Image: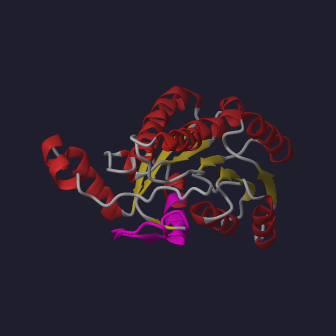
Amino acid sequence: MKAARTVIFTGASSGLGRALAIEYARRGAHLGLIARRGDVLDALARSLPTQCYCYPLDVRDAAALSAAGKDFIERAGCPDIVIANAGISVGTSTADPSDSRVFEEIVATNVTGMMLTFQPFVDAMRGAGHGTLVGIASVAGFRGLPGASAYCASKSAAITYLESLRLELRKHGVKVVTVCPGYVDTPMTVANPYRMPFLVPAERAAFGIANAVARGKRFHVLPWQMALAGWLLRRLPRALYDALFAGAPRKPRRVRKG
């Protein structure tokens, strides 16, 4: 697969998204950077040795994403790669009514936000007969974990959504790649109060993801140790899985003020 000339992605201001921006800039691609914090996006764009187009918006805003996609296509052409990377990771409790809105926010960002990220580019890619849509899911989507019901559910939904999309677009020459990272060292994971096996630096994760996309992989789990662990976890009988993981450490819930 030839090197990507144009790449646009969400969640670009920090963590894995920032690392992806640096990685693809190193590979010479022109970039579309989407995140909520415009000042951080501008600073990142100034630091990169490539053409960048910045779009400060929330991925739950369909109209803003549609406008950003139209602008990017007009200025840079149909992108070679679109990466839906924006996500929220926070613990939730079904018993607490105050978590209902948090649950909705997680699903709206991690699932609907992914669809809205791709939506402005699907017709252009189908017309061009090429392009790659990349969704950042998670190994947390393989099985449920206590205290992470919303996050696990959203990532499981993302995996299934991406599979459906891959089948829909295959005949049009458009590829869909599902990426399932394990623990990546980012501001999102730094608050986790438990051991995170096989923790990967964001820079290494971005390098691996870019290589997997370039090789045309359909499904990519990183690091390889987590790929093996995920394969085993998905095959554990429910009774054994329940016994092993019912007491697993819980993801911290969001601290609310007021």
User: Which quadrant of the figure contains the C terminus?
Assistant: bottom right
- Residue 32 in percent (x, y) is at 75, 53
- Tell me if 238 is positioned left or right of 32 in this view: left
Query: Is 171 included in the stretch rendered in magenta?
Result: no
- Residue 223 in percent (x, y) is at 39, 64
Q: Residue furthest front?
A: 258
For the residue pair 79 and 193, the one nearer the viewer reads as: 193
Q: In terms of image quadrants, where is residue 77?
A: top right
Q: Is residue 125 above or below residue 188?
A: above
Q: In terms of image quadrants, where is residue 52?
A: bottom right
- Tell me if 91 is positioned left or right of 145 in this view: right
Type of colouring: secondary structure
- Residue 78 in percent (x, y) is at 74, 41
Residue at 41% across / 40% down in the picture?
153
Q: Is residue 153 above or below residue 255?
A: above
For the residue pair 124 and 65, the one nearer the viewer reads as: 65
Q: In terms of image quadrants, where is residue 44?
A: bottom right
Residue at 40% across / 59% down in the picture?
182
- Residue 200 in percent (x, y) is at 44, 70
Range of residues picked out in magenta? 187-209
